[in-house]
Image: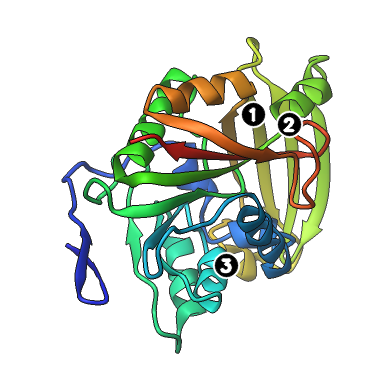
Amino acid sequence: MVFWKGRPVGKRRGTPLSNGWFTEAFGAHYPLLYQHRDITEAERCLARLQALAPLVNQPDELILDLGCGDGRHLELLFRLGFSAVGLDLSSHLLERARVRDSGSAGFPLVRGDMRNLPFAENSFAAVLSLFTAFGYFGSPAANQAPVTEVARTLKPRGRWFLDYFDGDRVRAELGTGKAKTRDRELGPLKIREIRRFEADQSLVSKDVILSPLPGKQAEAMALGVPPQGRHYTEQVAVFTIRELDDMAAAEGLVRVAACGGYDGQELGAGTRWILVYQKTK
């Protein structure tokens, strides 16, 4: 049982944690690759969400940060006076979240699979899926399970805040079939990333090839990158707005607000889709 301020948040449902590319991608090296996704960006994100719709309807209602990672959004939520729970599959990132939370009032952190949440029905006033913490399981149909779980755990009139990349922009960028390659060096690592569409353009793949820099093998090993290097492929679904709306509607969620980025651009005019869905009952 998970508790917050002495009351139960929910109960575990007994389903084993899953395997997939995401079990490897979100390892100890992940915060280094995405170090530019910092607390300043998280502040912009949460400010935009609150401009679109209230996070809670009543004081002390709970928020679920679904795919909370290292806890940067959780930290800000608590600074702002909200009560929140974080869930992630990565034990490495949850440990970083615990370190981030050290010395504070403490926010509950749970390891779990977003397709089978360890929480009771009607537990949360809001569920946050931020920085593309969605679309990891293949086809649109395979990604319905997290939407089902979001709707199940939301209170009536609760809201799902989905921060996702702009699928139309991704299709325009990679739709020619030509892969995009980026090389860089960060800390002890040499990094090559190759982004491409799969054949039916329903998935965008990113090959990630990590190698230790000369003389930095020990530092790289501490990040889970052995001397021979590490290679894995991320795969995220590329939806249309209509597909996302239909997936939400199938679970009794209706879109009530949207914009195209953290600066409040019109939907389609920015680089992201910030979508707010409300539970109808």
Marks 3 and 1, how far apart at CA: 26 Å
Q: What residue lies at 39% left-to-right and 73% top-to-bottom?
A: 107
Q: Secondary structure at mark 2?
A: strand
- Answer above or below: position of 23 versus 248: below
From the viewer's perspective, is 208 left or right of 138?
Answer: right
Q: Residue at x 48, y 62 (%)?
A: 93
Q: Residue 75: where, in percent of width, then height? A: 53, 73
Callout 1 amino acid: Ser
In the picture, residue 35 is in which quadrant? bottom right
Q: Nearer the viewer, mark 3 or mark 1?
A: 3
Disc number placed over residue 134 in the picture, else none: none
For residue 189, above or below residue 281: below
Q: Which residue is mark 1?
A: 205
From the top left corner, tell me how far across and down residue 205 is, in percent. Answer: 64, 29
The three-letter code of the residue at mark 3 reads: Arg
- Residue at point 78%, 31% (across, down): 268
Which of 258 and 2 lies nearest the eye of the viewer? 258
The single residue placed furthest to the top in the displayed view is 200
- For this view, does 5 lie left or right of residue 44? left
Quickly name the residue at label 2: 195
For the N terminus, give its image quadrant: bottom left
Residues at marks 1 and 2 touching, judged by CB atoms closer than 8 Å? yes
Horizontal side, residue 228 vs residue 96: left or right: right
Circle 1: is it few (<14), some (14-19), or many (20+) Cα within 10 Å?
some
Q: Residue 85 placed where, x, y %?
A: 38, 63
Disc 3 on helix, strand or loop? helix
- At mark 1, the secondary structure is strand
The label number, if any, that marks residue 72 in the structure image:
3
Q: Visible in this render: residue 168?
A: yes
Where residue 156 appears, x then y in whole percent? 33, 44
**273 to the left or right of 96:** right
